[in-house]
């Protein structure tokens, strides 16, 4: 049986992987040649088309692995409801699909191919699934910690707010014409959404006291 200290170590390792992944993306924003990519207009996936593609891929994979590790601990503790586990899986798989099928290079193609379409779908699914997973899991994950439950929910709602800005631009463009990605600072919105979601996930994954775990997880009472 995996001990509580071991599970806490896995949770912290998962959070560390999230932090390193986010740090690598931030690094790409300040080192050449990716420092020339606009952080306000270009999406994060643009780094996957650069000479530093391997750094971008490593960052996303680290976030996926950290998410999977932390969520698995919550599941084993009985702190992750089934719907949240499914949504968390969609987030993790979506990240891996983003790496496997890079964003199309619009400088050389006029329309997305099969891989580009998968990239788009995976991005939307991943960014929508994670905040929903945090919302669904917050009560079960923090039965005796109303403060952390509140913080997780606020961050999840804020993440959905960022996503709503993007979807709103799509709706406006569909109704009145134009290119939706020019209606908003897409790069800035996506980066804000990604950062908010990672912080929300870190709050969810951070270990709680042993008494709280025993209160929701029958296996821990053995």
Image (cartoon, rainbow, N blue to C red):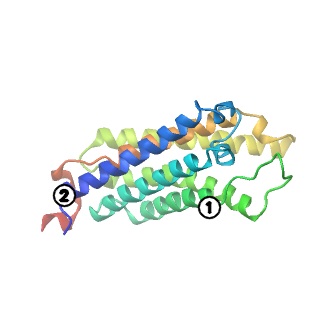
Residue 88, position in %: x, y?
A: 46, 59
Q: Position of residue 39 (x, y in %)?
A: 65, 32
Q: What element does badge 1 sit on? A: helix
Nearer to the camera, 151 or 35: 35
* First of labels 1, 2 by sequence position: 2
Q: Residue at image x 66%, y 44%?
A: 51
The residue at the point 18 percent across, 69 percent down is: 1
Nearer the observer, disc 1 or disc 2?
Answer: 1
Q: Which residue in the protein does label 1 denote?
A: 100
- Circle 1/circle 2 CB separation < 8 Å: no
- Please state the horizontal and vertical placement of residue 25, each as a whole percent of the image: 54, 40
Determine if residue 78 is in view: yes
Camera-side residue: 4 or 178?
A: 4
The answer to whether any part of residue 132 appears in the image is: no
Q: Quadrant of residue 168?
A: top right
Q: Nearer the viewer, residue 17 or 171?
A: 17
Question: Which x, y percent locates residue 211?
Answer: 15, 52
Q: Quadrant of the C terminus?
A: bottom left
**Circle 2 residue:** 4
9 to 146, vertically: above or below: below
Local packing at callout 1 (Cα closer than 10 Å; few below 14, some 14-19, many 20+) is: few
- Farthest-out residue, left: 222
Left or right of 110, for residue 219: left
At x 38%, y 38%, the residue is: 151
Spatial distance from mark 1 to mark 2, Cα to Cα? 35 Å
Q: How many callouts does the rendering have?
A: 2
Instruction: Using a 10 Å C-alpha cutoff, classify the residue at mark 2 as few (fewer than 14 neighbours), some (14 to 19) or many (20 or more).
Output: some
* Rendering quarter of residue 41: top right
User: What secondary structure is found at the residue carrying circle 2?
Assistant: helix
């Amino acid at each position: 049986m995996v001990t509580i200290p071991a599970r806490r170590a896995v949770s912290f390792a998962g959070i560390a992987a999230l932090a390193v992944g986010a740090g690598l993306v931030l690094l790409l924003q300040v080192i050449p040649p990716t420092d020339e990519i606009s952080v306000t207009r270009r999406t994060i996936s643009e780094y996957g088309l650069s000479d530093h593609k391997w750094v971008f891929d490593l960052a996303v994979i680290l976030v996926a692995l950290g998410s999977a590790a932390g969520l698995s601990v919550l599941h084993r503790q009985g702190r992750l409801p089934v719907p949240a586990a499914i949504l968390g899986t969609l987030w993790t798989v979506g990240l891996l699909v983003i790496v496997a099928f890079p964003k199309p290079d619009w400088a050389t193609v006029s329309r997305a191919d099969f891989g580009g379409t998968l990239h788009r779908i995976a991005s939307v699914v991943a960014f929508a699934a994670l905040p929903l997973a945090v919302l669904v899991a917050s009560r079960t994950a923090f039965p005796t910690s109303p403060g952390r439950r509140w913080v997780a929910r606020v961050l999840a709602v804020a993440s959905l707010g960022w996503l709503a800005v993007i979807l709103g631009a799509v709706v406006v463009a569909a109704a009145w014409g134009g290119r939706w990605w020019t209606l908003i600072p897409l790069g800035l919105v996506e980066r804000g959404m990604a950062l908010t979601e990672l912080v929300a996930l870190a709050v969810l994954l951070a270990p709680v006291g042993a008494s709280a775990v025993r209160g929701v997880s029958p296996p821990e009472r053995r």
